[in-house]
């Protein structure tokens, strides 16, 4: 190991210290290539995490609607006397936190439409 370090130190001319511009540029290019490969994958992980969060909230809303119906003689939550829209205030006692999405019920009490950020609802889950 000592011989290797001695050989490297001899490669510098007397009084020269540090890296050349070419060496620094090569390191910057390598870092740029690595960043270009990592950033798109990172955004996929963030997006899949947000979808999981949306589906978890959807599941909590379904549970809250069931709890609401069991305590209110199977009636659907209504907004101003109109069945359909589910608001946080209607099911707040059954949900922890606030709802980030919006949910609409059909006559059977199932969620027929939902929005959460920019994700699409296919009738059963967010994609």
Image (cartoon, helix red, strand yellow):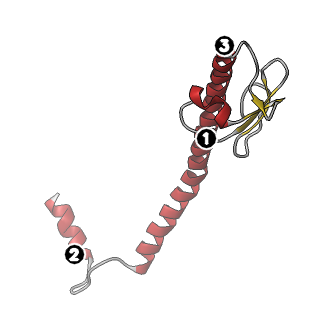
Does 68 appear above or below 113? Answer: above
In the foreground, 109 or 25: 109
Q: Nearer the viewer, mark 2 or mark 1?
A: 1
Disc 2 marks which residue? 10
Picture quarter with the N terminus: bottom left
Among the 4 quarters of the image, the one containing residue 113: top right
Task: Indicate which disc, 1 or 3, sits on the residue closer to the N terminus.
Answer: 1
**Residue at mark 3 to residue at mark 2: CA–CA distance:** 83 Å
Tag 3: Cα neighbours inside 10 Å, few (<14), some, or many (≥20)? few
Tag 2: Cα neighbours inside 10 Å, few (<14), some, or many (≥20)? few
Disc 1 marks which residue? 50
Q: Residue at x 58, y 47 (%)?
A: 41
Q: Residue at x 17, y 68 (%)?
A: 6
**Residue at mark 2 to residue at mark 1: CA–CA distance:** 55 Å
Residue 47 in picture, x, y percent from top left: 62, 43
How many callouts does the rendering have? Answer: 3
Q: Residue at x 48, y 62 (%)?
A: 31
Q: Is residue 1 left or right of residue 40?
A: left
Element under disc 3: helix
In the foreground, 74 or 27: 74
Among the 4 quarters of the image, the one containing residue 54: top right
Residue 89 in picture, x, y percent from top left: 65, 36
Q: Residue at x 59, y 39 (%)?
A: 98
**Residue at mark 1 to residue at mark 3: CA–CA distance:** 30 Å
Q: Nearer the viewer, mark 1 or mark 3?
A: 3
Disc 3 marks which residue? 70
Residue 76 in picture, x, y percent from top left: 76, 21
């Amino acid at each position: 190991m000592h011989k290797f370090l001695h050989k490297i130190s001899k490669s510098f001319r007397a009084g020269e210290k540090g890296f050349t511009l070419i060496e620094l540029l090569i390191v910057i290019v390598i870092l740029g290539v690595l960043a270009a490969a990592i950033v798109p994958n990172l955004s996929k992980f963030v997006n899949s995490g947000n979808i999981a969060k949306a589906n978890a909230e959807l599941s909590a809303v379904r549970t809250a609607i069931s709890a609401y119906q069991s305590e209110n003689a199977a009636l659907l939550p209504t907004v101003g006397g109109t069945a359909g829209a589910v608001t946080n205030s209607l099911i707040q006692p059954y949900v922890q936190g606030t709802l980030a999405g919006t949910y609409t019920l059909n006559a059977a009490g199932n969620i027929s439409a939902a929005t959460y950020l920019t994700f699409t609802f296919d009738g059963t889950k967010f994609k």
